[in-house]
Every structure is written in C-alpha cells, then in structure tokens.
Amino acid sequence: MFENLGQRIKTFFLIAIIALLALIMGVVGFGPAGSEGCSTSGPGYAATVRGQTITAGDFNAAYRAAGFEDRPVESQQAANYRRLLLDGLIERELLVHEAQKLGYTVDNEEIMRRVADEELVLLSGPVDAPAGFPSGALPYSFRDRDDNFSTDRLRRFIQNYLRRSIAEFAEWQGRETLAQRVRDTVTAPVTVSPREVWDAYVAETERATISYVRFGPADYRAQVEVTPEAVTAWMAAHQEEVNAEYERQGHRYRNLEEQVRARHILLRAAQDAPEAERSAKRAEAEALLARAQAGEDFAALAREHSDDGSAQNGGDLGWFQRGRMVAPFEQAAFSHEEPAIHGSVVESQFGFHVIEVLGRREGNVPEAEAKQEIAEGLYRTARAVELAEQDATRALAYLREGHTTDELNDQLRNNWQTPAAPAAEGEPAEGEEPAAPAAPARPDAPQVNTTSFGRADHALPGVDSSNLTSDVFAMTLEEPLPAAPIRLGDNWVVYRLDELTLATEEGLTPEVRERVEGRLLASKRREVLSAYIGGLRAQANADGAIRENPEILAYPTVDGAGDDEEADREEEASASSE
C-alpha cells in the first residue's frame, strides 16, 4: 500500500517536471545565470561537429557531472580530464549524426521520466578512455531525508549544480540516449564463442611459480681472460662480424681528442683515516709497484689486490680523454708518450694508485688497430656468453643432484669453490695440513630469484621470455627441472618449477563462465566500437567537420577558483543537506 502511494507521489512529481519542461522547452536561460543563455564569460563553444555546436555550458555541465571539478586542479591536469571529456563529447555528436541518418528519435518527456525514475545521468566518455574514467550511466540521488523522490532536488541539481535549464538538460540527455542507441546497434552482432571463454578462463586461472637464475654475459665479462693471441685467433674466425661492426662503429675512431688507455691497482684509503693506516696503504701500494716493475702480471696483481670495481677486469679502465679522471691520476696517465708503468704511487682522494699506461692516441685510429679493438670487445662478449652457458649448465646439473636453491646460491657466490671451515686457533698439529684459504666471494654473482606468472604472461619481467613461459607450462611438479638451460637472447636461464595451477572443466562453473564471458564480451565490443568511432572521426576530420576551441582545454589556476564556482559548491552542499 505504502509502495503504491510512494509511486503515485513520484508520478505526480514527474508530471510536474514534464509540465514544467513543456512550458520552458525552447526557452534558453531558464534558471540561474549559469545557464547557457545568461553566460557572460569564458569561451562561447567547446567544439562543433558536423554543424552541431557543443557549447561551453554543455562542456562545463558534463565536467561537473563527472565530478572532475571537485578534484585538485593538479590532479585534473595530470589525468588530462578536459581533453578526454572533449573527445567523449565529440564522439557523442558523431554518433548522434549517425543516429539521425538511421532515423532514431527520442522523446524529451520520456527522457526526464527516465532520469527521475532511475536517478541516472548519462555521460559520454571517449571509447578508449582509461580505466576508471566516469562515463555511461552515473548514479545520482534525488531523494529527501525521508528517502522520497524530490522534484526540488532534481531541479536544483540541474539548475544550480549543472547550471543547465531543464530544457538544456533534457536535450543533453536525449543526445546521450541517441548516441547510446548507435553504440548498441554497432555492438549487437558481437558474440563470444565457448572456445574463447575457455581460452580466457585458462589464461586467467593457470599460474606457475618458479625459482630461477639468469646467467648473463654482463656477469662474466670481467672473468674473460683477454690475450692478444686469443683475440687474433677469434678475429680470424669471425672476420665478417668484425668488418660489419667496424662499418657501424667506424666513426668512433676518427677525429679523436687525445686519449690514454690505462689500468690501475687502487688501494682505498679515506683522506681522514689515521696517518698510520694511510702509511700502511702507501707502503702496500709501493710494494705492488715494485712487483709490477719486476715483471709480474699487472692484471693478475689488480685482480688480487685492487679495491676498485675494475679489478675483475685486470684493472683495465679502457680509453679515456682528459677530464674523465681525478686530477692526480689524469696527470700521471697523460705524462707518458709510450706504454709504461708509472714510476711512483699516485695519491688521490680515493687512496693510492699503481698505474700502467697501455697506449696513447689522437686523431684517426688506423683501421687495423680499430678492428683489433672492436674484435677484443666482441671476443669478450662471446666468451662471456660461453661462460654464462657453462655456469648455467653446471647449475642445472647441481640442482638435479638434489641440492637446494640456497646451496646453489652459495656455490655461485663462492665461484663453485667450497669455503674452508674456520681454522682452529693455534698452530696446526704435527703432520696436519694448514687449512686452505676461504674461496673469494663474488658479490655480483648470479643468484636465485622467484617469480609467478600466467600462461599469457612473460615469465621474466622486462624480458621477451614467452618461450620460457611455454617451457614452464609444459613441466610437471613431478619433473620440475628442464632438460637444459633456456636461452633468452644472450642470457641463459635455469629454473625449478615450485607451484603450478592448471585450469579444469570443474573450475569453469556457471558463475565463472558468466563472469569471463561478460568480460570478454565487453572487451570485444569496445574494440569494435573503437574501430567504428575511429572511422567516423577520421572521415569527419577529412571533411573538415570537426572544429575545437583550444580555450576550453585550459585549466583554472590553482588559487584562481572563481566566486561562481564557490557559490556552486555552497549551493550544492546546501541542497545535499536538505
């Protein structure tokens, strides 16, 4: 009984609105000064589309309806709301133009009845709008404190908040309705097959978790032993590759500024360290200098004693020009015309350096010398890839022996050498061998990581690893290790399958099927609609039938909110509290 009474009351209010609409239909300017006919500031139009004008008032009302105006200006700008909204309104008018050609019509009285009955406001966003962009049917409440429909609240929403007359609002919602009918017409033939539903269900359900190690050449370049003999032999077997690389890089060897190639041994010593500590470091550096001058392998000394990151590369710093190194180091390096070991220890802000100058050049580098240098780089990379593959193969074999990933981490960190047990205090007993020194740790060694992914994902983020994904999903938990390392470009990957979730027919319940089908259908409809609207817009642009007013895209200054906007907010707050 009370529901029937409420419906009769609501019907009475609707009749009142429709009667009011009939009185003001075609009369622009009903309501407050914010309606289109009374606007005295701002751009006069937002855009014109095939002869139809989207007024500034139309744009601003839609902007308010979406709730954008209530957000900080910086957020509006970052999200590009004005551009997106204008695109949506332009697309709407393109669709309305098609609706009129198809003979579609709307009844404004019916439009107002629907708004009051459903309490929804239609708003067009661009078809390719980012997720979360408010569009479609936006819910609004036009009820009073007793939860009864209020004609006055609807009127105040239209006139005070949106700044539209009722006629303008009805016209706006009518055009939104026409546009939506065309969208429905275009997307009606779109269907989803059972196979598509199953494939989508599999893609979202099936997941794998693996523990893996990636062995890349960058991890092994410093371990490559580079000798002139090795480079020459490799160059002879890869002459075409060297020639092609010289064609690409030849410009790097012409018109050079003065350069020096050097390597060094650095013993770090803080400038504020105690003098005794610095003196000890200097003495150590002088001893290493004497050993190098006596003919010991400089690169081997650097690998064993240098505190610099170049140590693993034998202390080699490559070619560098003036201004790249700290002043004391640069002065010493550029003081030699020919290859030589600098005759004294050099002190810098980093500590004490023993320096060997390997070469000096300027101007154009002879082609043979440039190719030799290029070949050295290519050889180092190729050899590093080989070392990476060797370690990957060894790691897989180690896991196949039953070792854990933690144990593998230790092996890699210690370069496959088992650290010695801590030595007992005191001298070794008679006949007992001294304890072996602990294996040197590799802080940059490849290590085990874990990752989870779906059948449609790349197994490793940031890497084209679709072949690894396929390989993993062909595995079973009973046989979790691959037959061989997987190659990804110049990298090698060893993995162990830890978890595997597969799709089943039983899992595809009616509820799940409905959800997956709905998502697929929405996606396919969006694709079809995007192509259709894209064609309409391309044709309209070709016809010169779209004109935008760039002023409508301007955002207000952060502290420049106008009095009218503040009054709108106060009026809306007052209306909401009633």
Image: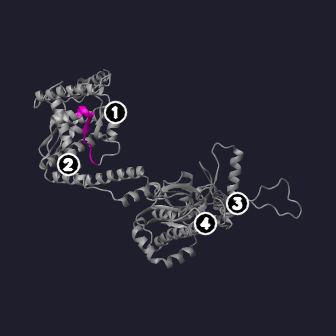
The residue tagged 1 is 71
Q: Which residues are magenta?
A: 115-127
The reply to whether the C-beta atoms of the residues labelled 1 and 2 are less than 8 Å apart is no
- Residue mark closest to the camera, 2 vs 4: 2
The answer to whether residue 286 shows anywhere in this view is yes
Q: CA distance from mark 2 to mark 3?
A: 74 Å
The residue tagged 2 is 182
Q: Name the residue type under label 3.
A: Ala
On the image, which quarter does residue 446 sit in? bottom right
Q: Earlier in the sequence, mark 4 or mark 3?
A: 4
Q: Name the residue type under label 4.
A: Leu
Q: Which mark is residue 396?
A: 4
Describe residue 198's horizontal placement relative to residue 292 as left or right. Answer: left
On the image, which quarter does residue 240 sit in? bottom left
Q: Which mark is residue 531?
A: none
Q: Earlier in the sequence, mark 1 or mark 2?
A: 1
Q: CA distance from mark 4 to mark 1?
A: 55 Å
Q: Is residue 118 in the magenta section?
A: yes
Q: Earlier in the sequence, mark 2 or mark 4?
A: 2
Which residue is more in the foreground, 555 or 436? 555
| In the image, residue 364 above or below residue 335 | below
The reply to whether the C-beta atoms of the residues labelled 3 and 1 are less than 8 Å apart is no
- Residue mark closest to the camera, 2 vs 3: 2
Q: How many marks?
A: 4
The residue tagged 3 is 439
